Amino acid sequence: MNSGRETTNGSRISALATALADPTRAAAITSLLSGTAHTSGELARACGVAPSTMSSHLGKLVDAGLVIVEAAGRYRHYRIASRDVADLMERMDAVDLPETNSPQRPRPGKDISYARSCYDHVAGRLGVEIHDVFVDRGWVTVDASGVGLTDAGDAFLTDGLGLDLEALARRSRRAMVRLDIDWTERRDHLAGAMPAELMSFMLSEKWLKRRQDKRILTVTEVGRRMLPEHFGINPSELTIGS
């Protein structure tokens, strides 16, 4: 295989566009936005193609540097290459262009639109609601200088949820918190090291669970109690995405 990473006048736009031009490859990388690993067979079933066809497409995505492959015994697992790639894919999907055929958007407030993992943080309506709570309660500040976690936010996460933010800051070289434009909601949700830690906490505490496709998140019975208790989210809203 060639590297698939040729540049034109120093730009990788053409190579990336070529790698993503096929609808099956675009569907495969969208499935990988869960941040979790998938086998070629799982992706083939999700995209409705033969396993041999999916293997060929995955080879092109690996060559382009968009996907990585890991060996696990006799299986090969595929993941999106990095947070940067995941952010790029999500932002590309959020851009509205004057297309001849508009993309079919998910139903608002249902399934993938309600709660999903955007690589390693919560997105969809639930992600936007969590963003709003953090802003309204003064746990994060958003101004011209950027986004920052406040002392009140630190206290909530540390004392209220038991997250070790000091350890997180030591091991993470990424921003503690930043904003992403949500693909389905067209509003901001929180991204960065802290929201990633928060999603990991919610999954481990079984407030959320992954659906079979791994990207869609479901609020559990535990989550229906804990999310209103800690974030003040209306319990009736939580049933929409369940």
Image: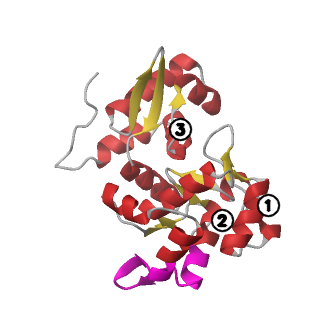
Identify residue type, mark 2: Arg
Instruction: Judge whether residue 147 is colored magenta.
Output: yes
Judge the density around disc 2: few (<14), some (14-19), many (≥20) Cα neighbours within 10 Å.
many
Label 1 element class: loop
Of callouts 3 and 2, which one flags the residue occurring earlier in the amino acid sequence? 3
Give the Cα separation between the discs numbered 1 and 3: 30 Å
Q: CA distance from mark 3 to mark 2?
A: 26 Å
Instruction: Give the quadrant of residue 50.
Output: top right
Q: Which class describes the residues within 10 Å of circle 1: few (<14), some (14-19), or many (20+)?
A: some
Q: Position of residue 237 (x, y in %)?
A: 78, 68
**Which residues are drawn in magenta?**
131-153
In the rendered image, the residue lying farthest to the top is 74
Q: Which residue is mark 2?
A: 125
Name the element at disc 2: helix
Type of residue at label 1? Ile
Mark 3, other Cα within 10 Å: few <14 / some 14–19 / many ≥20: few
In the image, what residue type sits under mark 3? Pro
108 w.r.t. 133: above or below? above
Of tags 3 and 2, which is closer to the observer?
A: 2
Residue 195 is left or right of residue 10, and the answer is right
- Residue 131: percent from left, percent from top: 57, 72
Residue 23 is labelled as 3
Compared to residue 71, the image places residue 28 above or below, namely below
Residue 231 point in image, percent of width and height = 66, 73
As for residue 77 lying within the magenta part, the answer is no
Front residue of this view, candidates 216 and 10:
216
Contact between marks 2 and 1 (CB within 8 A): the answer is yes
Indicate the quadrant containing the N terminus: top left, top right, bottom left or bottom right. top left
